[in-house]
Amino acid sequence: MNNNNPLNFWQSFFGFNPGNNNRFINQFSPTQNRIWGQKTAVWIDTQNAFKHYLEIPELRTVINKRASMMSNNIPLLIREADGEIITDHWLNALIKKPNPTQSWADVVYSLSVNDALYSNSFAYAPKRAFGVRNLMLPLPSDKMKILTTGRTLKQMDKEGLIAGFEFDYDTDVEKLTWDEVVYFSTPDGVNIINPSSRIESLKFPLSNIKASYHKRNVLLENIGAIGILSAKNSDIGGAIPMTPEEKKEIQRDWFARQKDELIITESDVNWQPMSFPTKDLMLFEELTEDKMALIDAYGLNYSIFSQSKGATFSNVRDGVRMAYNDTIIPETKQLYDAITEQFGLDKDGLRLIPDFSNITILQADENLKADALNKRADALNKINAAGVLLSEEEKRAVLHIENDTF
């Protein structure tokens, strides 16, 4: 045996062979081995999007906040020519009662959640006589399959691309036609239909969030302080090492005890810490960074979510405004535009639009706009009173109006 082999020192010191076959770590439970023995990154399976939505609170919080904000609107059916609100139409009855168990806000909420998880959302809305639809029921996107026509070029409408759908009941599969399903999607920039889910791009932060919770749980439930117990006994010749039996007994005792139990030994030992306090592991900072990645992916603002350090009212207010103006309002309009097109409302000169004027924070913005318009109108009146003749284009410029008439 080569006494100069550095591995002999560790074998003598710790009492076990560091080779793979005899490693003491191989005696760990699966949970312990995950913490101490894992040497490669562990990534989640992004195909289980709904499972992650149920299990990862940060993901569910962001998706639910987006869905709640999108559903918090008043749907209005207007005539495109003059913007007049239409109240006598079958769509108004559908909005009032889309299906037996959900309100219109619930339908929009469900469609938003499915879109967030799969970038696709579906609703069962069969066309009745005279093009009327009196039922709109969101369907789980992970149970739907798009049947393509096989013709992708030179198609002028979605019917030319999509032949129909299959709805998997787990026990049965039902085929649905284009006229029975309303289909919405968020483009990924590459695929014409059935785009890739945003969850695909969130694999790394979602994996780190799960690992962070796992690490914290193991530290709380299974692992106490981490360090080295070394012998303190000595004689005239120096330190007296533990016997192999003493080392093995302490090791067995450490792994067998509960988190609140103490090691009791007759050996005189010294404790050398080898770990950091939980706060020094930066687990909470990692969680925050990963959550911010989720927030950015869904176009929201960090200030509108709970924060350990707190947030000022102005930051929350501005964050809500930014989220609505940059993401919520445009994406809800896209959803309603798709409904307008697939219901054939545009052929009758009608359009479904979301009205967010009921949002208090956005009302403040409208008041500011109205005040600014009044000031510009006063300025225009003073110009007219001074006898200055302005062209129609110049008047529009003063009022900041881009339409042809005002």
Image (spheres, grey):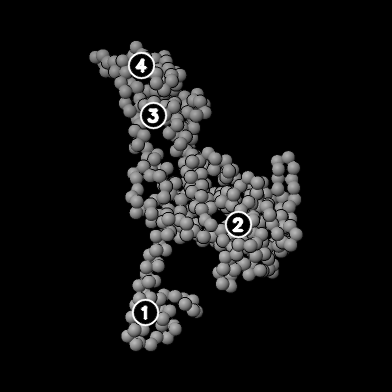
Location of residue 371 (image quadrant): bottom left
Q: Residue at x 41, y 50 (%)?
A: 304
Q: Alpha carbon of mark 1 to alpha carbon of mark 4: how far?
A: 95 Å
- Residue 247, percent from left and from top: 40, 18
Secondary structure category for the residue under label 4: loop
Q: Nearer the viewer, mark 1 or mark 4?
A: 1
Between 110 and 24, the residue placed more toward the observer is 110
Q: Alpha carbon of mark 1 to alpha carbon of mark 3: how far?
A: 90 Å
Where does the N terminus fall, quadrant-wise?
top left
Secondary structure category for the residue under label 3: helix
Which residue is the site of mark 1? Answer: 380
Q: Nearer the viewer, mark 2 or mark 1?
A: 1
Which residue is the site of mark 2? Answer: 185
Q: Alpha carbon of mark 2 to alpha carbon of mark 3: how far?
A: 61 Å
Q: Alpha carbon of mark 3 to alpha carbon of mark 4: how far?
A: 19 Å
Q: Which mark is residue 6?
A: 3
Where is 198 relative to 378, above or below? above
Which residue is the site of mark 4? Answer: 242
Q: Alpha carbon of mark 2 to alpha carbon of mark 1: how far?
A: 46 Å
Mark 2: amino acid: Ser
Q: Is residue 23 visible?
A: no
Mark 1: amino acid: Leu
Where is 317 relative to 79, above or below? above
Crowd class of label 4 (few under 14; some 14 to 19; many from 20; radius 10 Å): many
Among numbered discs 2 and 3, the one appearing first in the sequence? 3
Q: Residue at x 75, y 50 (%)?
A: 175
Among numbered discs 4 and 2, the one appearing first in the sequence? 2
Among numbered discs 3 and 4, the one appearing first in the sequence? 3
Mark 4: amino acid: Met
